Image (cartoon, rainbow, N blue to C red):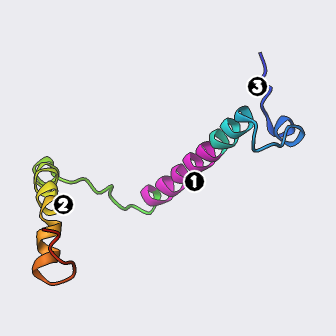
Amino acid sequence: MFNTLNATWMNNHYDWNNQQFKGRVAGSLNLAANYVANVLHTLWLDAGQPILEYPQTMIVMIVAVAPIFVLEREPLLESIGMIENSD
């Protein structure tokens, strides 16, 4: 009925080896981060600023092109002399 894993419970069961304590800490941090994000989002909207949205084509292009740069990283570093050829 009541949430027994509150701040008093955490204070009485402070133990970083306890998985239940670690889970409750993670939940508390997550909740706090969500509250901060909500406040910042509300302030941003109240200031009259638009929420930035990117066109779907741009996102698809970034997702499609990014692996090329990742795969070409080693030959690029070899060509500019930052690493030696491992062959």
Identified by mark 1, the residue type is Val
Question: Outermost residue toward the right?
Answer: 12
Which sits in the foreground, 46 or 12? 12
Quarter holding the C terminus is: bottom left
Which sits in the foreground, 85 or 79? 85
Magenta stretch: give its range.
Answer: 29-45
Q: Toward which corner of the image does residue 4 lie, by quadrant? A: top right
Q: Which residue is mark 3?
A: 3
Q: Earlier in the sequence, mark 1 or mark 2?
A: 1
Mark 1 or 3, closer to the camera: 3
Quarter holding the N terminus is: top right
What residue appears at the point 85 percent right and 37 percent down from the top-left corner?
Answer: 13
Dominant secondary structure of the magenta stretch? Answer: helix
In the rendered structure, the answer to whether residue 2 lies left or right of residue 24 reads right
Residue 74, how many percent across, how many down?
17, 68
Separation of disc 3 and disc 2 at Cα?
46 Å
Residue 36's label in the rendered image is: 1
Mark 3 neighbour density, 10 Å: few (under 14) some (14–19) many (20 or more): few
Q: Which residue is mark 2?
A: 70
Residue 28, how many percent across, how many down?
67, 42
Q: Is residue 37 above or below residue 22?
A: below
Which sits in the foreground, 73 or 66? 73
Element carrying mark 1: helix
In the rendered structure, the answer to whether residue 43 lies left or right of residue 55 reads right
In the rendered structure, the answer to whether residue 16 lies left or right of residue 65 reads right
Residue 43, how many percent across, how many down?
50, 59
Q: Earlier in the sequence, mark 3 or mark 2?
A: 3
Identified by mark 2, the residue type is Val
Task: Please check the rendered image and state whether residue 20 is part of the magenta-colored stretch, yes or no.
Answer: no
Q: Are marks 1 and 2 in contact (CB under 8 Å)?
A: no
Separation of disc 1 and disc 3 at Cα?
22 Å
